[in-house]
Image (tube, rainbow, N blue to C red):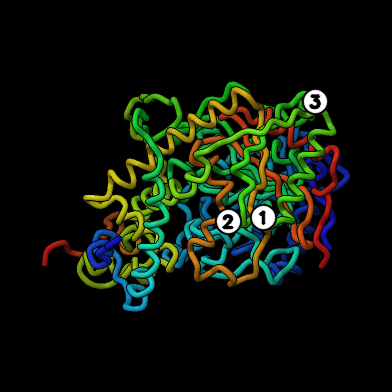
Amino acid sequence: MAELLTVKAIRDAVAAGTVTAEEVTKNCLARIDAEDPRIGAFLEVFHTRALEKARDIDVMKARGDELPRLAGVPVAIKDNMLLAGEKVSSGSKILQDYTSAYTATVVARLEAAGAIIIGRTNMDEFAMGSSSETSAFQKTHNPWDTTRIPGGSSGGSAAAVAAGFVAASLGSDTGGSIRQPASMCGVVGMKPTYGRVSRYGIIALASSLDQVGPFTHTVQDAMLIMEIIEGRDEHDATSVELEDKPVAELLEPSMQGLRVGVPKEYFIDGMDPEVRARVLEAIEVFKQNGAKIIDISLPLSPYALPTYYIIQPAEASSNLARYDGLRYGTRAPGALEDSYLTARSEGFGLEVKRRIMLGAFILSAGYYDAFYKKAVAVRNALRKEFDEAFKQVDVILSPTVPGTAWKLGEKFDDPIAMYLADVFTTPANIAGLPGISVPCGFANDLPVGLQLQAKPFNEMTMYTAAAAYQAVTDWHTKVPQA
Amino acid sequence: MDINLDHIAKLAKLRLTEAEKELLGRQLPSIVEYVAKLQEVDTSGIDPKAYLTDATNVFRSDEPTTVQAERDAAVAAFPKSAGDALEVPGIFK
């Protein structure tokens, strides 16, 4: 079914005039219409809007205007990103009829760059989940094996790229929600440094952890998306003016002399031995190509996940206080308190209730210091530990996930087992580092991902290493057979 | 770990069903026990900053910049309204 389709190839073909943006978009829509019923990646496809925008690009081209950087490239967005006039639900029943009043900065920047926003993708409710199964609307199936989950929470966006529907999509990553599904779907997924990309217009999960980033097949494509969406935005006070802005075409992939740190804490007992084997093979590839492999230790790593499961529910329970039935969604009858209780109890699913309860408990009188304040202190200690490690190494290499995609329903009733899928990805969110997952082979016919983490705002080093790995391997060119 | 579910549900503005209470009554203590692992970490001498970036406050003048279309869309999204007036349930009995 799918053949490898890259952002760069589409962009160059539209710019050269060998294909029109309308043809590209029609092909993309046809693939989704024909095959998405089997995958369930999309909650909604913006047929009319996408074709209109594509025709606008073709008019520009016909006039001889200079085309913007991503002219004619279809991109899917996660269902927690606002696009004025279109529905957005964050995978929740409480927002099922909500229409965006404005457009998220990342989406506005993509459209201004000529990208065609093709539709919104399925996700775990309010991005709370690791399998996309907590969505109030549908299940998404892994394109490599449709009896399995795509990972989560950005499972729809990962599956849309893996299935060949689009060359790129956006996800959001609070504890691994881009990198983990990228690993499970055999695509590239990147979480930028906290502050690199604006969160304006993204439905919040945990504001000190959330970052938006791309899913693509290649590192170069990830860069093409990143260079458009990244940088200071006056609407997000935590977004940063960037000193270094990598340009995809100027990247020189290389591993020569690269200091690659391999932390022993990321090769845990109980991880899938096949996953371990694939990552060890990848380390060998780095070594063969001139990288220096350095064994390191990050003793606080095992504490990243418990830290995450304090900070994230605490922030989420505060962020989700706004869903009271007054401002959005469905107004429940009755007096004020009753109306709140009914709207929230009927509108939220079980995982969301679980995390709101956990967050409310952690922040409640008598427990705040023992849990929240302690977690914030450990968070700072973790960051310091990474800062020390990066004096010795340029990138930190590890598996992205301890295993591969599991069967739909398999871990649904065991929250801690589900949370453990994020054990290697949460440290980057806790410490605010950039991380990327790149395909590095297969374990029992299911994709395995390799994670590279770098110093904050040192994406360039991470891209250089990840692109160099892709230059000497072909795992990213493998596509699922229907 | 003793968790008073009724008290927490009240703080969280959630009305839990009996089945949810039974389930969360089992799950929350085991999650809390798992995260309590953090007590093992020595954090004496660590400055507990809530945000890790070195970002400092940036000020701008406080001038209204109403975008009519966004304003109208926000009013339209409000579940109950009459013209420009937003309707909310009574606070007093």
Q: CA distance from mark 1 to mark 2?
A: 16 Å
Q: CA distance from mark 2 to mark 3?
A: 32 Å
For image coordinates 42% across by 41% down, the residue present is B67
Q: Which quadrant of the figure contains the N terminus of chain A?
A: bottom right
Residue for badge 1? A158
Q: Nearer the viewer, residue A137 or A445?
A: A445
Up/down of A463 relative to A339, above or below: above
Q: Chain of mark 3?
A: A
- Asked if residue B65 can be seen in this view, the reply is no
Q: Position of residue A20 (x, y in %)?
A: 81, 48
Q: Position of residue A138 (x, y in %)?
A: 58, 70
Q: Which residue is farthest bottom? A: B18
Of labels 3 and 1, earlier in sequence is: 1
- Asked if residue A350 can be seen in this view, the reply is yes
Residue for badge 2? A421
Which of the 4 image quarters holds residue A262?
top right
Amino acid type assigned to the residue bearing label 2 in the image: Ala
For image coordinates 43% across by 40% down, the residue present is A208
Q: Nearer the viewer, residue B62 or A198?
A: A198
Amino acid type assigned to the residue bearing label 3 in the image: Gln
Which of the 4 image quarters holds residue B83?
bottom left
Q: Position of residue A117 (x, y in %)?
A: 64, 51
Amino acid type assigned to the residue bearing label 1 in the image: Ala
Q: Which quadrant of the figure contains the C terminus of chain A?
A: bottom right
Q: CA distance from mark 3 to mark 1?
A: 31 Å
For image coordinates 75% across by 68% down, the residue present is A35
Residue for badge 3? A256
Classed neighbour count for the residue bearing mark 1: other residues with Cα under 10 Å, few (<14), some (14–19), many (≥20): many
